[in-house]
Image: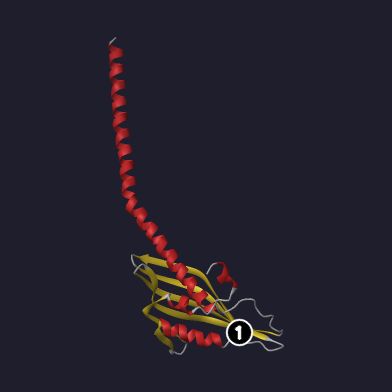
């Protein structure tokens, strides 16, 4: 009988130890879950900020291509500084509104243009952020009856951002032109169904 009592006592001891371990583990898991909530919220805020900044980068290209001045301008804070240096040390420096006006003058002299924003890296730190975006601008000159030409420009946009009144926009933008490729085709231009204003078909669907 003594061995049965010892066995029963050891079984109870093991059960008690298991119960304690289970409570400790479950308590740690709950504590860990509670502790991760702020981290999860911070990660979500960062993802939301990145998506809003990415959308603004796309808004800029759309604003230029559709010649939608209001859309292009809201990408920049009013006091934003834009710099576009050239190879000899000169180039453009002004605010966002001046840069958009400069781009307008250049784009009005050609028949069509298309800006593609490609790989973008964004770093967020609270209400501040920075990004680098590779882009390609295809600028199509007015064609003649027997040929057309397109200049493809490869650029990078290096931007600093801030969120003011819940609106992400550019504080500073440096436009780095890496190279350009003029392309001449000995054929007439086929024309385009796209429009550089709000008569473009896309506005009727979504914008």
Per the image, label 1 sits on a secondary structure element best described as: loop
Please report the residue visible at 31 percent of the width from the left and 30 percent of the height from the top: 19
| Residue 93 x/y as whole percent | 41, 86
Which quadrant holds residue 198? bottom right
Please report the residue visible at 41 percent of the width from the left and 78 percent of the height from the top: 173
Q: Is residue 12 left or right of residue 106?
A: left
- Residue found at the very far top of the displayed protein: 1
Please report the residue visible at 36 percent of the width from the left and 67 percent of the height from the top: 166
Q: Is residue 81 above or below residue 58?
A: below
Which quadrant holds residue 183? bottom right
Please report the residue visible at 52 percent of the width from the left and 87 percent of the height from the top: 106
Which quadrant holds residue 47? bottom left
| Residue 91 x/y as whole percent | 45, 88
| Residue 167 x/y as whole percent | 38, 69
Callout 1: 10 Å neighbours few (<14), some, many (20+)? some
Q: Is residue 37 above or below residue 174?
A: above
Residue nearest the viewer, comparing 134 with 127: 127
Residue nearest the viewer, comparing 199 with 159: 199
Type of colouring: secondary structure
- The residue to which callout 1 is attached is 111
């Amino acid at each position: 009988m003594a061995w049965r009592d010892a066995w029963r006592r050891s079984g109870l001891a093991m059960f008690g130890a298991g119960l304690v371990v289970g409570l400790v583990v479950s308590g740690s898991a709950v504590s860990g879950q509670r502790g991760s909530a702020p981290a999860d919220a911070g990660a979500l805020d960062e993802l939301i900020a990145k998506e809003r900044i990415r959308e603004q980068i796309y808004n800029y290209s759309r604003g230029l291509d559709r010649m939608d001045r209001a859309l292009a301008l809201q990408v920049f804070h009013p006091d934003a500084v834009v710099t576009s240096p050239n190879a000899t040390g000169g180039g453009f420096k002004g605010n966002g509104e001046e840069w958009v006006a400069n781009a307008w003058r250049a784009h009005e002299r050609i028949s069509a243009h298309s800006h593609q924003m490609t790989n973008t890296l964004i770093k967020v730190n609270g209400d501040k952020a920075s990004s680098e975006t590779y882009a390609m601008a295809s600028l199509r000159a007015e064609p003649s009856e027997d040929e057309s030409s397109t200049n493809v420009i490869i650029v990078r946009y290096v931007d600093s951002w801030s969120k003011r009144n819940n609106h992400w926009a550019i504080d500073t933008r440096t436009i780095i032109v890496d190279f350009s490729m003029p392309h001449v085709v000995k054929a007439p231009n086929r024309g385009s169904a796209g429009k550089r204003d709000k008569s473009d078909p896309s506005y009727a669907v979504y914008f």
